[in-house]
């Protein structure tokens, strides 16, 4: 009887309501059944603030690894593996991952992940805004490096749309300035303007945030096979799975600010998103300076207060001596 009641309740539910409930389930996959939170290490934060490179001195020179090429390969690997996995392309995956990793993919991902979730797996390498190393292990000629990436789906498109929107706004202001504030029909390409405004409505960062778009955290472990590298294990999860709400909101705010602000890009370090590195570094410098000044002012207040108390005590003693 209870089962019959549940079936009736399910049949009464609109299809779009069921789809919304399913879509709220956060995506999390791993070849080892362990989701890696991929939190940004304090050591990487310090190196980034001081040198602009969160991975300073992790890859030693004697290893003969081109750091720039490795990071570029990391982005391509994350994008390629996620794309092949979404297509369930075993042949394509076999060229990118090790034999053991391929077996783990079959057992822990392909057999356990709902079919409707595979379309959410692909990662556009242009949406990766931060990547850093968390470990490097060497055993003879074998080297294993674990790299973590943060990406925000639609970030690259949102930046493109925002640039087009600002360009359109600037051209309209220039046209109006030339004609004393009066816009003529021939001054505006209405078709292009409508396309840009529609794209802005769909892809601006605020709308992406409202739609529930989440930061995707990946952790890939690579092992050298001759002169090439192959993936031996990986984890991919939306931040709702592995971060608390405060951390998620902070990082989303950083992504939003990075896209909306006009900033010069950091030169010299080939990270996933130089503009984000510049913003993140400036933010941390501001926080350090702010707290440094706050601590200094507290110390100054304490020092002045102690000196005032000493001077007041000295004057009281002097007055008592004079009265005697």
Image: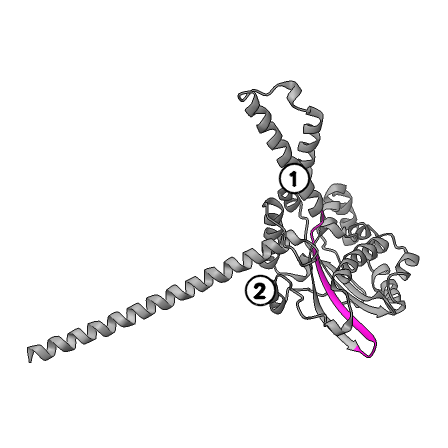
Q: Is residue 140 magenta?
A: yes
Q: How many marks?
A: 2
Residue 14 at least partly seen: no
From the viewer's perspective, tell me whether residue 324 is left or right of residue 126.
left
Query: What separation in Å lies between label 2 and label 1 (alpha carbons)?
Result: 30 Å
- The answer to which image quadrant residue 307 occupies is bottom left
In the image, residue 62 sits, relative to residue 246, either above or below, namely below
Q: Position of residue 57 (x, y in %)?
A: 67, 70
Q: Quadrant of the C terminus?
A: bottom left
Q: Secondary structure at mark 2?
A: helix
Is residue 321 found left or right of 46 in the rendered image?
A: left
In the picture of the structure, the residue carrying the numbered disc 2 is 50
Colour scheme of the rendered structure: one colour
Q: Nearer the viewer, mark 2 or mark 1?
A: 2
Q: Position of residue 16 (x, y in %)?
A: 74, 41
The crowd level at tag 2 (other Cα within 10 Å; few <14, some 14-19, many 20+) is few
x and y, in percent, of residue 265 in the image: 63, 51
Residue drawn at point x = 83 percent, y = 57 percent: 81
Q: Are marks 2 and 1 in contact (CB under 8 Å)?
A: no
Q: Residue furthest right?
A: 91
Q: Main secondary structure of the magenta part?
A: strand
Region rendered in magenta: 139-154
* Residue on which disc 1 sits: 163
Q: Residues within 10 Å of mark 1 (few under 14, many from 20)?
A: some
Residue at 43 percent of width and 62 percent of height:
293
Query: Which numbered disc flags the more N-terminal residue, 2 or 1?
Result: 2
- Above or below, 180 against 316 in this view is above
Please tell me whether residue 300 is drawn above or below residue 121 in the rendered image: below
Residue 19 lies, in percent from the top left, at: 75, 45
203 lies left or right of 88: left
Q: Residue furthest left?
A: 324
């Amino acid at each position: 009887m209870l089962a019959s009641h549940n079936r009736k309740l399910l049949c009464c539910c609109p299809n779009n309501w069921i789809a919304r409930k399913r879509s709220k389930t956060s995506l999390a996959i791993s070849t080892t059944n362990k989701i890696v939170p991929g939190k940004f290490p304090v050591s990487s934060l310090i190196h980034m603030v001081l040198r602009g490179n969160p991975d300073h001195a992790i890859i030693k020179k004697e290893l003969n690894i081109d750091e720039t090429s490795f990071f570029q390969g990391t982005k391509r690997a994350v994008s390629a593996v996620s794309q092949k996995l979404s297509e369930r392309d075993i042949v394509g995956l076999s060229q990118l991952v090790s034999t053991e990793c391929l077996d783990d993919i079959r057992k822990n991902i392909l057999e356990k992940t709902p079919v409707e979730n595979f379309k959410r797996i692909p990662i556009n390498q242009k949406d990766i805004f931060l990547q850093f190393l968390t470990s490097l292990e060497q055993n003879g000629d074998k080297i294993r490096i674990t790299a973590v990436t943060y990406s925000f789906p639609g970030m690259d498109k949102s930046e493109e749309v925002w640039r087009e929107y600002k360009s359109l706004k600037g051209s309209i202001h220039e046209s109006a300035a030339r004609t004393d504030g009066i816009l003529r029909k021939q001054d505006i390409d209405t078709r292009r303007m409508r396309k840009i405004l529609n794209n802005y409505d769909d892809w601006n960062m605020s709308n992406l945030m409202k739609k529930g778009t989440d930061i995707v955290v990946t952790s890939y472990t690579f092992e050298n096979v001759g002169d090439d590298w192959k993936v031996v294990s990986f984890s991919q999860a939306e931040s709702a799975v592995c971060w608390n709400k405060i951390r998620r909101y902070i990082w989303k705010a950083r992504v939003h600010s990075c896209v909306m602000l006009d900033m010069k890009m950091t030169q010299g370090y080939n990270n996933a998103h130089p503009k984000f590195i510049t913003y993140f570094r400036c933010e941390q410098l501001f926080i350090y300076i702010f707290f440094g000044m706050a601590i200094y002012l507290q110390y100054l207040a304490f020092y002045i207060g102690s000196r005032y108390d000493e001077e007041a005590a000295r004057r009281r003693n002097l007055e008592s001596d004079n009265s005697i």
